[in-house]
Amino acid sequence: MLERHSRIGGNAMSSYTIFDSALASIADAGPDLRNGLTNHAPMAIEALCALGQEEAVIPWLEHYRPGMMPWPYAHKPVNPPAWHLALGHIEQVTDWRAFFVEELDAAPWREVLDRWVSRLAPAICASAAHGVIRVAHAVRALAEAETPTRLAELAAALGYWAACYQELPTDLSASQPPSRPSTAIRNVAIVPLEQRKFTGTIVGSLERLDEFAPFASVIGLADLSGDASRVVSELTETFAHVYLANAHDVLTTIVFVHGITSGASLRLLAPHLSEPVIRDASRYTWQAQCGIYAAFGQRYTPAQEPVAPQESHEELITMAITNGDEHVIKLTEACLREYEINPSPVYLAAARHAMDVLKG
């Protein structure tokens, strides 16, 4: 299993004193925003606390709050013996949240997490990976302190993942020997530009991979054996390069941010998962990251070798808070965390790039 890291990018120790009250203040806010995009508030405020930036939580939240909507009305309860029949039914997102409240009442949260990550891992791509990313942020907060508010957030996060369940085309019969992610990415076929049709969401573009036959074998291209921490570093570093090679405007920057943060979410989850579940989750994380690349990318590595920005880690954090965009905050935290473990300049370059393109 991965080691637990209490420091983020060499910054001050994380601080969660305000987290529960801030989280409780948005407990009635559903998983989607009024503009149709995903509600990032629970993830962003957790990232700020992990960065030791509690004083930024309330001002950021008050700016973001007007875009939130309440949880939808309950539809029908999820039937425990037939839970799989409710997967992917977004109209049951509130029912799924209630289901996981009961699951977490009945068993320790790590037990519930391990069981359900195993079941939901084939859908790590769900909602552009927002399900698994939100679960990961909830888990880190719970590992810091187990409170009713944090357990409720884990229930909401797992419920969102289950309700948005989406699998990518998967062919497990490998046609060529796997290689490490940084090499395997060269063998990932991308959808030809003339065949792409962006309909407004990342999810829609990922759905079109069902019509792109070469993608199904992607899941077997990467050798993800060995130390789990090293695997996460390989995944995040590879897709930080993919990010820099392809992010050139607001849309592509937001799209490829998720290639990095989905991989970084695995680092937060893995210390609490059994070995078989970690391995499965790693495989489907790679697949989800490749799905983003295949649907939106054009090249797997930037034209020039990434160079770390001149700003210190502390300055990057301040800049992310000043910027205010939820993706920038979450990406900066993830990149500083990954850099601490694997000091590649590509992480810092990616975080700095996003600040220039996205504005809160």
Image (cartoon, rainbow, N blue to C red):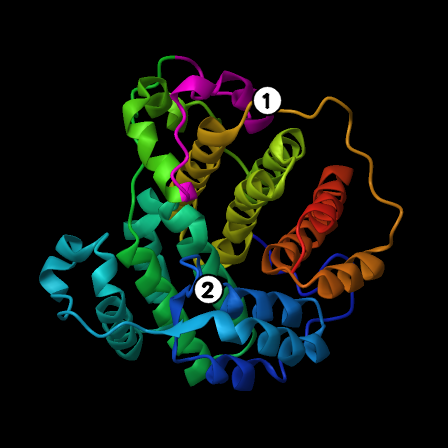
- Contact, mark 1 vs mark 2 (Cβ under 8 Å): no
- The image shows residue 255, relative to residue 104, as above or below, that is above
Q: Residue at x 36, y 70 (%)?
A: 156
Q: Position of residue 76 (x, y in %)?
A: 13, 70
Q: Residue at x 67, y 34 (%)?
A: 244
Q: Would you identify the image quadrant in which residue 219 lies?
A: top left
Q: Residue at x 35, y 71 (%)?
A: 155
Q: Would you identify the image quadrant in which residue 33 lies?
A: bottom left
- The image shows residue 241, relative to residue 97, as above or below, that is above
Of marks 1 and 2, which one's residue comes earlier in the chain?
Answer: 2
* Residue that extends furthest to the right in the rendered view of this protein: 310
Q: Position of residue 272 (x, y in %)?
A: 46, 60
Local crowd size for mark 1, using a 10 Å CA cut-off: few (<14), some (14–19), many (≥20): some
Q: Which mark is residue 219?
A: none
Q: Position of residue 198 (x, y in %)?
A: 41, 35
Q: Position of residue 206 (x, y in %)?
A: 37, 36
- Viewer can see residue 75: yes
Measured in 3D between alpha carbons, the distance from the residue under mark 1 to the one under mark 2, in whole angstroms, is 30 Å
- Looking at the image, residue 321 sits to the left or right of residue 154; the answer is right
Would you name the residue on which mark 1 appears? 299
- Viewer can see residue 192: no
The range drawn in magenta is 176-202
Circle 1: residue type: Arg
| Mark 2: secondary structure | loop
**Between 204 and 3, which is closer to the camera in this rendering?**
204
Q: Which mark is residue 39?
A: 2
Q: Would you identify the image quadrant in which residue 60 lies?
A: bottom right
Circle 2: residue type: Asn
